[in-house]
Image (spheres, helix red, strand yellow):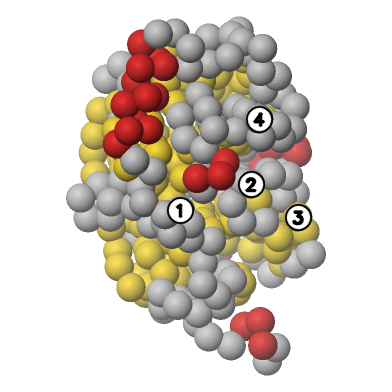
């Protein structure tokens, strides 16, 4: 066995999703960012949204951010993001939006359409002190932009980081990885997670085991020390498996790997990152290193200067 996969990361804590209301009364389930798991440096929050579109139509109206990054992952439905400077984009099934809030912006996230179901996630990722006041940036990727590694009944969509020589498109300020792992019934996979990184898996469909511990829907499994995990989907009758190539959750989604059928196999997000190790001072949508910086964020927001309309949020880094 290679030195890269010698120490299995055990599951050291399991957190069941807590029902909460966010935005304009939209019901979500939260795991990271609750009293049971306040944060997991550098990760601040993970929400799952899974509702008929007409029950989530009020969406998430204008709200500010400063000092961290957000990642919106869609499985079903479409979500439009738009900021106070008029920058906008739409993420469809299997798509991802990575937003570096940096020094600040004001934006909304609203469902598109009235039919079908809205199913997705939002992850909040802290920024190191040196990047908290960087220029805001958007990275929008549709399902076709995200590479996948398939092997023996497993499909790993690499959104960020590297797996089996395949790199994800998201550029992260802080080293990390973000995978969407889809296993057919009875299939198994081994995934490397760098030593020293914080990590967890969030199970969003099916059942099975992760590093030998039971994996249940709507639960986050916090990982201990080591350099890899194993995951295995629960076995099922052959008739429950659906051909990925001919089935999808919605029109145009055949390529994103969700077509094995809801409730079968095992599907989870694997999220890991290098800890920042700095003080975390959070007040709602502002995450800084001190109370003084939080007070300044509120003052800037109230004065209408949180977002600079001259910032080109579609271009790369600008640390000014």
Question: Residue under circle 3?
Answer: 167
Quadrant the N terminus occupies: bottom right
Residue furthest front in the image: 292
Give the spatial CA distance, label 3 vs label 2.
12 Å
Nearer to us: label 1 or label 4: 4
Q: Which secondary structure, mark 3?
A: strand
Quadrant the C terminus occupies: top right
Q: Is residue 43 above or below residue 107?
A: below
Q: Which secondary structure, mark 2?
A: loop
Q: Which secondary structure, mark 1?
A: loop
- Of residue 185 and residue 172, the one placed in the foreground of this image is 172
Q: Is residue 172 above or below residue 72?
A: below
Residue in the image at 56% along x and 23% along y: 78
> In x, y percent, where is residue 29?
31, 40
Question: Residue under circle 4?
Answer: 320
- Of residue 250 and residue 118, the one placed in the foreground of this image is 118
Question: Residue under circle 2?
Answer: 172
Label whose residue precedes the other's in the sequence (4 or 3) = 3
């Amino acid at each position: 066995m290679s030195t890269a996969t010698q120490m299995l990361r055990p599951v050291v804590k399991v957190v069941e999703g807590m029902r909460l209301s966010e935005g304009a009364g939209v019901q979500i389930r939260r795991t990271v960012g609750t009293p049971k798991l306040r944060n997991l440096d550098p990760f601040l929050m993970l929400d799952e949204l899974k509702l008929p579109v007409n029950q989530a139509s009020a969406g998430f109206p204008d709200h500010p951010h400063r000092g961290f990054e957000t990642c919106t992952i869609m499985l079903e439905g479409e979500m439009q993001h738009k900021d106070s400077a008029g920058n906008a984009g739409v993420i469809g099934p299997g798509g991802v939006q990575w937003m570096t809030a940096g020094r600040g912006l004001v934006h909304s996230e609203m469902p598109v359409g009235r039919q079908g179901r809205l199913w997705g996630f939002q992850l909040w990722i802290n920024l190191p002190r040196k990047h908290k006041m960087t220029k805001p940036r958007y990275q929008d990727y549709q399902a076709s932009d995200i590479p996948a590694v398939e092997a023996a009944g497993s499909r790993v969509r690499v959104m960020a980081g590297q797996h089996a020589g395949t790199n994800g498109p998201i550029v992260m300020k802080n080293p990390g990885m973000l995978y969407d792992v889809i296993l057919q019934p009875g299939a198994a996979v081994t995934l490397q997670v760098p030593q020293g990184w914080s990590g967890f898996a969030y199970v969003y469909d099916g059942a099975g085991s992760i590093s030998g511990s039971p994996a249940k829907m709507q639960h986050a499994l916090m990982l201990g020390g080591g350099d890899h995990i194993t995951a295995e989907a629960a076995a099922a009758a052959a008739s429950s498996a659906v051909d990925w190539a001919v089935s999808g959750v919605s029109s145009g989604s055949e390529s994103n790997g969700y077509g094995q059928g809801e409730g079968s196999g095992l599907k989870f997000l694997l999220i890991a990152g290098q800890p920042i190790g700095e003080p975390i001072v959070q007040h709602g949508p502002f995450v800084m290193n001190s109370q003084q910086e939080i007070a300044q964020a509120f003052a800037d927001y109230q004065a209408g200067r949180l977002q600079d309309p001259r910032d080109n949020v579609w271009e790369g880094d600008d640390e000014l």
